[in-house]
Structure formats: C-alpha cells, structure tokens
Image (cartoon, rainbow, N blue to C red):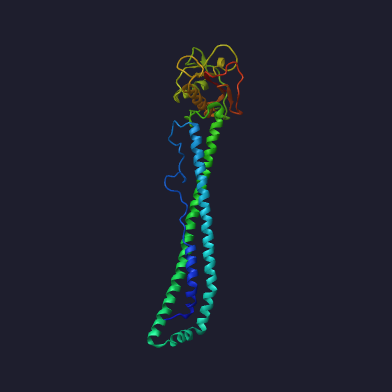
Amino acid sequence: MTVRPRRWLMLALAPIVAVTFLAAAPVSPASAEPGDGTSATPDESAGKQNQTLDELIESSNRRFVQAKGAVAKSTAAQKALAVKIKAAEARRNELIPEVNAIAAQQYRFGQLNAASFLLGSQGSTDFWHKAVSLEEINSQHDRKLAELNQAIDEVTQSKAALDAEVKNQKKNLVVMQKQKEAANEALDLVGGNSLTQGKVLAKSPIAKAAPRNSEGGFSPESCTVSDPTTNGCITARTLNMYKEVKKAGFDRFVGCHRDGGPFEHPKGRACDWSLQDKGFAVAHNADMKEYGNNLMAFLVRNADRLGIYYVIWYKQIWFPARGWSTYHGVSDHTDHVHVSML
C-alpha cells in the first residue's frame, strides 16, 4: 500500500474545506417560470385586431414592469453567485501553499516520516490500524479537494447560465421598453387621452398609397372625378382615400363635394364622415364616439400614404407637420370627421 504522509495535515483542514464547499454550493438561477410573462415573448397585442390603445398601453406597461423586476431579481442572484465563487476560489488558493509545503516536506522526509509513523506501532494490530488511518486520511483529503473543485465548477456553471439569462432578460426589457414607448407614441399620434381616452383601436389597416410625382411628392390635382357621394366632382387622390376608408370598414354616411364656400370641399379635396348611417348628429353614445375615434385614427395613421392635408375631429385639428391643436372653426366637428387632401 502506498502511503502519502504529506496529507496528514489535511485532516485538520477538512472541516474548513467542508464549510467552504457548503458556502460555495450552487444556487439555482432566478429564472422565470414558464408562463409568468417575464421571458422574451412576442407582443401580446399580435393577433388582437380589436385591442384598444388603452388596453395596449396597460399591457405594455405591465410587461415592462415585469421585465424590469425579472432583471433586478436575476442580477441580484448573479452578484451573490459571483461572491460565492470568489470566496471558494480564495479558500482554494489559501490551501495551495500549504499543500505545496507539505509536498516539499514529503519530497525530503516523506518516506522516513511514514516509516516512523508505522514503525512506532505497538504490535501488528496497531500497525494495521495506523496504516488504515493513513489511507483514510489520504482518501478524505482527495475527496474534500474534489468536492471543493466540483462546488466551484458547479457554482461557476450556474453563474454562467444566470449570466446568459440576465443578458436575455435585459434584451427582453429593451423590447418591452420599446413597446411601451410605441404604445404611448401611438396614443399621442391620435390625440392622446384628451381626445380619445384610449378608446380607439390600437392598429389600423394599411391603406393603398396614392400615386406620387417623380420627386416623391403629391402634385396638385383638379376636380375631375365623379363624386360617389354627390353629383359633384372630386380629385383622383380624394377618390382613392374614399375607397380606402370604405374598404377599412367605415361605411356610414359620408359627403364630399359641396358647392360654394371656402376651403377644400368645393375643390373636391375634402370629405365629411358621419357617425351614423343617415345625415349628421352629435356623438351621443360610446358607439358613435369610438367610430369617430377609429376613423380619425385610420386617416392619421395613413396620412402619408394617402396624401392627407389635415383632419378635424371633436374640436381638434391635426396637421402632419405639427400634430394636434384646438380647432376654432364654426363647427366643433363633434358630429363628423373631416379630412382634407393635398
């Protein structure tokens, strides 16, 4: 049996190694449980055609807070694991000089010490017990150092997995932040809470773009196309807008060309979209107000594609270049949505 007396000292160190092992035991990462909404997921609004902006804003804010909390929780666990790894590695590094010193002593006196230890036995039974004790010391030393290294490896692996999780969660947080900002921008685009109270569809269909000139702009057009709503005329660009609004599902009463008066109606470049099937009446229920909100939102969101000049709805006027402002015209436009074309 080969004995290694250089390891006797490690019997005294074994409790310290054991404590280090327990302190360095791997901790499970604070990973998100399936279905808790903290992992990177597609936008919840995908596929919800009837989701309103207030619902979108609420859900996007909720997902943002959840994602932010997940990052904070995992980052805390990440720091805790880093401390444990550092402590375990420091204890291992403390043992190395001691082991090296014992190894040097064994190189010079090891065989004599082992012989002295065994030859000092009181009889064959005592000799046997001492030999067994020496082997047990060696085995225990090997096992404890192996456990310490394994603990460090396992904690390191756990931290690596948690690092990857934190990185993924931070990416998810950026996505949630962008969705939150996009929802708020979408609300601002359609007049904010003061105009719609969020009671407006979060998304609108994409309209067919009107033809542009060679410079990418919209050239002036004459009133040469028959108006489908009156006996008058409208421009080709106005007709395209009319068709696209109808195709988007806004099929209540509408009137475009109007003889006399200023602005765009006599030029065939404007339409008034009623909130009811016949004639005009002030919005006096939720259905009428939301119909106007959704129609206005469709026009504003597609303004660049359709060549819209401005939109008026519920005492507010919107220009592409400056956004919304209070409208001070004769009509407060609470009974219809007005749209003028370039």
Number of marks in the rendered image = 0
Q: Where is residue 219 in the image (x, y as percent from the top left)?
A: 57, 24
Q: Is residue 63 visible?
A: yes
Q: Quadrant of the C terminus?
A: top right
Q: Quadrant of residue 223?
A: top right
Q: Where is residue 67 in the image (x, y as percent from the top left)?
A: 50, 45
Q: Which of 217 and 118 is in front in this view?
A: 118
Q: In which quarter of the image is the N terminus?
A: bottom left
Q: Which of 78 and 317 is in front in this view?
A: 78
Q: Position of residue 234 (x, y in %)?
A: 52, 17
Q: Can residue 210 be seen in this view?
A: no
Q: In this view, does 13 lie above or below 323?
A: below
Residue at x-position 51% and y-position 58%:
81
Q: Position of residue 326 (x, y in %)?
A: 61, 23
Query: Quick check: 322 left or right of 35?
Result: right
Residue at x-position 52% and y-position 22%:
237
Extreme front residue here? 122
Q: Is residue 277 above or below residue 92?
A: above
Residue at x-position 54% and y-position 31%:
187
Q: Nearer the viewer, residue 64 or 40?
A: 64
Residue at x-position 43% and y-position 71%:
143
Q: Which of 275 and 309 is in front in this view?
A: 275
